[in-house]
Image: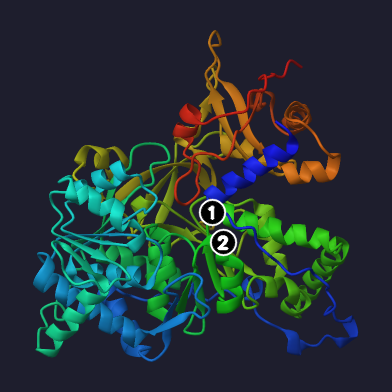
Amino acid sequence: MSYKKRTEAIRNRLNEIKLPHLKLKKLEMNDVIHLDELGLDFTRKISNSRPAPKSGHYEQSHYSTVKEIFRYGTDTFRDRVFILDKDKPRDKEFREYTYGDFREDVEALGTALTVKYMQKGSPIAIIGENQYDWYVSYMTALTGAGIAVPLDKELPDNEIEITLNRSKAEAVILSSKLRDRILKLGEKGRLPYVKTFVVMKSGEPLEGNVVGFDAVISEGKELLAMGERSFIDTETDPDEFRALFFTSGTTSDAKGVMATSRQLANNINAVSAYVRINEKDRFFSVLPLHHTYESSIGYLLAVAYGSSIAVNQGLRYISQDLKDTRPSILIAVPLLIEHLYDSIQKNIRKSKKEKMVDSMMHTTRVLKTMGVDIRKRVFKEIYDGIGGNMEYIVSAAAPLDPKIGQWLTDLGIIFLQGYGLTETCPISAVTPEYDTRVGSAGKTIVNGEIRVSNPDENGDGELVISTDTLMIGYFEDEAATNDVIEVDENGRRWFYSGDIGHVDKDGYVYITGRIKNVIVTQNGKNIYPEELEQLIMENEDFSDCMVYGKEVPGEKELIVTARVIPNYDRLKEKYGEMDIPQIYKLLLHDIREINKKTTNYKAIKGLEIKDGDYIRTSTKKIKRYREIKEGKILPVEDLRETE
C-alpha cells in the first residue's frame, strides 16, 4: 500500500476513535517582552512556587454524602452558572444553566421518577453523551431516587443488554441518539426489569413505557407545587449502596463495582487536601461521564466549590469549544493530552519558532526561581490556542509521558496526575499543587495508605491500597471480591490493585506496569511492557505502540514484540515518500537503537506494524487481551533481531 493510502487509512481510523485534528493559530510570538520590562507585577503563583501548608496539606472538607455536596453547592451558589451546554453541537451559543436551575430540575426529576415511574431506591441506568440531562440524572439517583448505574455509551447492544439485566435497572435514562437501539432491546423482551425509558432532550409524553426527560421534569414540578416532598426530604445513608460502576474490562470481563455515598464524597475530601479550586474555576468536560474520574473529580468536585462545567460537544469541536468557554481546568486521558501536545509542537515547528520557545522556556524557568513568573504572558499565543485561561491540566486513567508533563509545567500550567481504579471509586493518589513531581502518579491521599507487596530488587511490586474511597465490593460476586480485598488483623481492608510500582518516602506513587501485562522470562525475570513502551515513544518515528509477549510455535520463550503505529506524517517530513517495507526497515533500525537503552533480557525482538488503530476502551486505553487476539497487523515479514 502506498504512503498516501496508508496515511489516509490511519486518519480514517483516528476519525473513528474521534481524536480531534486541533486547529491552532499560527504562532507569531510577537508579544515576547524584553527583560528590562519585567517586574514583580507579573508574578503569578503556580504549582511549584506555592508554599506547602504547614500541616503538610490544606484543610480538608468533611462531606459524608453526595447530598451534602448537592445542598451546599446549590444553596451557596444558586445564582451562579453551573453548566454550559448546547442543545445541538452546531448551535452558535452555549446555553447556561445556573445552580438554581440545576437544583429545581434534580428535585423535579427525582419527585416524578419515584412517585410515578419506578420504585424508590431501585437501580437507575444512565447512558448517553455528556450533556446537562446526564448531570441532572446522576445527581437525582445519588441524592435519594435510587442506585446510579452509569453505563458506557460505546458498549455494543449485547453488552448494554447484559449490564442492564445484571444491574436490574428499573429506569433507563438514555440519550436520544441511543433511543432506537435500546428501545429495540426492550421491545424484544430482553430487558425484563426495565419499567420506564426516559429519553434525554425530549419532551415526548408517556407512550407505553417511553417518556421524554422534559416531560418528566414538568410532571415533577407539578407534584412539587402540590406539596409532594417525599424525594426532597429523603436523607441518604452515607454507607448505603448508592452507585454501581462497571469496569472497562481492559484485561478481563467487566465487573460491577459497588460504591456508597460516603466513598464518593471522600473523593472530594481527598482532593481538597491537595488542590484548591473555587467558584471562578471552569472545568472542561471531555471525558465520558460514566468514567468514575469524570463523574467525581470532573463533576462532584465542581459542585462542592461552586465551579462551572463546560460540556465539550464532541472532540471534533474541541478547539472551538475551548475558545468559546475559556476553561481553567482540563481533565483528560493521556491520549488526548499527548495529541494536544503534538498539535502545539507541530504548530511551533510550522511557525519556525522552536528555538525561540525553547529559549524563552529556559529564561522563564530561571526568572521563576527569582520570584518572577511571566510565563502566561510570554506564551500567551499558546494559551490562546487552548482557550486562554488554562490553569490546570489533569491526566487520568493511565500514565503520561513525563516529558509532556514537564513541558506543560514549564509552560506555566499546573500539571497534575491522579491515580486510582474503578474499585477505589477512584481516587487513591493525586498530585498536590504545591509540590508537583512530574513522573509520579500523585501522592497517596490523606487518611490512605499504599504499600508495595513482594517488592523486587528495584523496589517494585504490586500496589496494595487502603483508602476511605475503597469500594464495598463487586456486585453479586463475593468470590471475586475476596480475590482482591484482604482484611488485616485490625479490620482494615486492603485492595490488591494489579498495578506494579513503588511508593517513595513522601508517599508519591510511581507506576511501572500491570501484573497481567507482565512478560515473565524462562529464568523468572519480569519485563514490564510499559517501560519499553515509554522508551519507544521517546522516538518521534512512532505515533503509538503496544509491547507484549508473543507466543511463537516452537519457542519456549515469549517473544518481546512491539506492535506499533508509525508517525507517517513525521516520517514523510524527514525521509520523503516510503512504502511499508521501507518504513518497516527504518523502524526496525529504531528498535535496535532503543534496545541499546535497556538490558539484554528486555530487548524487543519482534516488530509489527498495526493495521489501523488499536482496540480500545471508551477512555482510549488499549484492550490488550483483545488486541493480542483480534488486532490486525500489516502483512510485513516479522523480522527478529539476530545480533
State the CA–CA distance, disc 1 to disc 2: 7 Å
Q: Is residue 471 above or below residue 143?
A: above
Q: Nearer the viewer, residue 293 or 145?
A: 145
Residue 18 is marked as 1
Which residue is rendered at x = 60% and y = 71% of the image?
A: 320
The answer to whether one can see residue 33 in this image is yes
Question: What quarter of the picture does the N terminus occupy?
Answer: top right
Quarter of the image with the C terminus in it? top right
- Evaluate whether residue 446 shows in this view: no
Which residue is at 43% across, 47% downward?
Answer: 451
Looking at numbered disc 1 in the image, what kind of residue is underneath it?
Lys
Residue 282 appears at what percent x and percent y? 51, 77
**Amino acid type of disc 2?**
Arg
Q: Position of residue 485 (x, y in %)?
A: 29, 44
Residue 255: quadrant of the picture: top left
Residue at image location 47% in from the left, 60% down from the top: 287
Q: Earlier in the sequence, mark 1 or mark 2?
A: 1
Q: Report if the CB atoms under discs 1 and 2 are less than 8 Å apart.
A: yes
State whether residue 458 is above or below residue 345. Answer: above
Crowdedness near tag 2: few (<14), some (14–19) or many (≥20) residues, C-alpha within 10 Å: some
Label 2 element class = helix
Report how many numbered discs are placed on residues in the image.
2
Residue under label 2, please give it: 316
Q: At 49% across and 72% down in the image, what residue appears?
A: 57
Left-right relation of 97 to 245: right
Colouring: rainbow
Q: Position of residue 146 (x, y in %)?
A: 18, 65
- 495 lies above or below 26: above
Q: Position of residue 128 (x, y in %)?
A: 35, 60
Q: Give the camera-side residue of 437 and 310.
A: 310
Q: Which mark is residue 604?
A: none
Name the element at disc 1.
loop
